[in-house]
Image: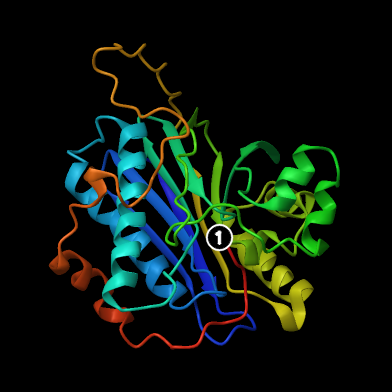
């Protein structure tokens, strides 16, 4: 696969970093993930690290060298991450479970598949135009969809930090329908936290990337996001892939209903689902060893 990767993560004006990024490749497949721990709850950085580690572990286990069922892979990995976060909150004896957003993308065969929970976004950008982006699981996104407020008003709306879904916590998220699209030469897949997209308009993001390499354009956009956010700047994180393959993706085969392993939209990702409860103490410990020094006090931030 011909591509380049750019990633950066800034602490902004927050006391510590709660965003986590991950990328993994098998040569014929690649996975990207970005998680943004919720600052309004204890140990959001632990939840974000667990979510990213879980995606990475699943990819390393199943990419041989490609993922057989991309939709089912994303469903299982995100659901397992939710279960691990809930279990870890219980093991730590916390009064409230750590929580995080997640956006995850799988690329293989010239095509991208993605899913998400929360308000960390994926943008697919082609020739300076937006092909598609994820729609946040937030109250203000519902207001935008209903035509009650304009997209430009999201950044200043008083309820902009109210999430409707996240990983971790007592309210279990529902599975977002896994989306997919073929990739064209010079497409950009951009995963980012709300600390990046929040202070910027969609036009600023698109114009900033138009005709430029992500590695050249994104540092300037990150600086702009930090400047516009000022003293309230959140953690700012981006993970971008610039696709360089010339050959178009082949059409997806029509799935055999007898073999289709894709869960239906709206499937509950609750920690009571049997597949997600098979998490050992050793697995949890190995994924959070470097997060044991997490601060005990939450950073004022989003709630879900």
Quarter the N terminus occupies: top left
Measured from the top left, where is residue 151 in percent x and y? 80, 48
Q: Quadrant of residue 282?
A: bottom left
Q: Quadrant of residue 93?
A: bottom left
Q: Which residue lies at the image location 40% right of the left edge and 51% below the top edge?
A: 32
Would residue 156 appear left or right of 129 to someone viewing this image? right
Q: Which residue is mark 1?
A: 215
Measured from the top left, where is residue 162 in percent x and y? 66, 61
Query: Which residue is more in the foreground, 262 or 243?
Result: 262
Q: Which residue lies at the image location 72% right of the left edge and 55% below the top edge?
A: 208
Q: Which residue lies at the image location 49% right of the left edge and 74% below the top edge?
A: 18
Q: Relative to 201, is 248 above or below?
A: above
Whether residue 116 appears in this view of the structure is: yes
Q: Relative to 247, is 99 above or below?
A: below
Quarter the C terminus occupies: bottom right
Measured from the top left, where is residue 217 in percent x and y? 64, 59
């Amino acid at each position: 696969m011909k591509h380049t990767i750019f990633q950066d993560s800034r602490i902004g004006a927050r006391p510590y970093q709660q965003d986590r990024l991950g990328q993994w490749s098998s040569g014929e497949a690649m996975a990207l993930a970005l998680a943004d721990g919720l600052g309004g709850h204890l140990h959001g950085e632990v939840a974000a690290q667990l979510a990213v580690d879980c995606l990475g572990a699943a990819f390393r286990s199943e990419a041989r060298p490609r993922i057989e069922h991309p939709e089912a892979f994303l469903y299982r990995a995100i659901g397992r991450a939710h279960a691990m976060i809930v279990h870890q909150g219980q093991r730590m004896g916390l009064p409230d479970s750590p929580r995080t957003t997640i956006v995850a993308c799988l690329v293989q065969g010239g095509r991208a598949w993605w899913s998400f929970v929360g308000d960390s976004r994926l943008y697919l950008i082609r020739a300076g135009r937006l092909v598609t982006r994820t729609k946040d699981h937030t109250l203000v996104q519902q207001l935008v969809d209903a035509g009650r407020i304009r997209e430009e008003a999201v950044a200043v709306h008083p309820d902009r930090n109210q999430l409707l879904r996240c990983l971790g916590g007592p309210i279990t998220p529902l599975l977002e329908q896994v989306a997919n699209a073929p990739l064209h030469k010079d497409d950009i897949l951009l995963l980012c936290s709300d600390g990046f997209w929040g202070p910027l308009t969609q036009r600023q993001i698109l114009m900033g990337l138009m005709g430029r390499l992500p590695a050249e354009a994104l540092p300037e956009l990150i600086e702009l996001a930090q400047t516009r956010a000022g003293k309230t700047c959140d953690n700012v994180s981006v993970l971008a892939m610039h696709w360089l393959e010339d050959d178009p993706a082949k059409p997806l085969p029509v799935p055999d209903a007898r073999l289709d392993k894709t869960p239906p939209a709206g499937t509950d990702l609750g920690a009571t689902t049997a597949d997600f409860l098979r998490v050992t103490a050793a697995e949890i410990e190995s994924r959070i060893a470097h997060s044991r020094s997490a601060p005990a006090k939450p950073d004022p931030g989003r709630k879900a």
